[in-house]
């Protein structure tokens, strides 16, 4: 139960970042909530290319590069 007695209908929330700096896109994702699953609280670097979306969970997303 929440403070306002509203329950979430989604089991997971994933936030996508699309940052632009010095002519280049930097993308990342963040898992805000994933019901019933342990998950990272860090920003995860990702790329979108011809083959689709690729994530790099072992790499560190550096804000200075974004």
Image: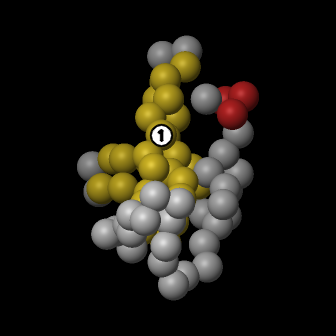
Up-down relation of residue 9 to residue 55 (above or below): below
The C terminus sits in image quarter: top right
In the image, residue 6 lies at what x, y percent?
A: 39, 64
Residue drawn at (47%, 40%), measured in percent from left and top?
17
Q: What residue did someone put label 1 on?
A: 17
**Residue lying furthest bottom in this view?**
36
Up-down relation of residue 25 to residue 44 (above or below): above
Is residue 11 visible in this depiction of the protein?
Answer: yes
**Residue lying furthest top in this view?**
22
In which image quadrant can residue 65 be found? top right
Residue drawn at (43%, 65%), measured in percent from left and top?
5
Is residue 46 visible in this depiction of the protein?
Answer: no
Q: Nearer the viewer, residue 47 or 42?
A: 42
In the image, residue 29 lies at what x, y percent?
A: 50, 51
In the image, residue 58 lies at what x, y percent?
A: 67, 64
SS label for mark 1: strand
Up-down relation of residue 47 to residue 10 (above or below): above
In which image quadrant can residue 51 be found? bottom left
Residue drawn at (37%, 47%), measured in percent from left and top?
48
How many C-alpha atoms fall within 10 Å of the one at disc 1: few (<14), some, or many (≥20)? Answer: some
Residue drawn at (56%, 50%), measured in percent from left and top?
45
In the image, residue 43 lies at what x, y percent?
A: 62, 51
Q: Nearer the viewer, residue 60 or 5?
A: 5
**Residue lying furthest front in this view?**
4
């Amino acid at each position: 139960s929440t403070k306002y007695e509203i329950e979430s209908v989604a089991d997971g929330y994933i936030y996508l970042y699309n940052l632009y700096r010095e002519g280049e896109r930097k993308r990342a994702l963040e898992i805000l909530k994933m019901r019933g699953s342990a998950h990272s609280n860090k920003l995860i670097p990702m790329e979108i290319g011809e083959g689709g979306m690729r994530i790099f969970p072992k790499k560190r997303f550096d804000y200075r590069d974004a």
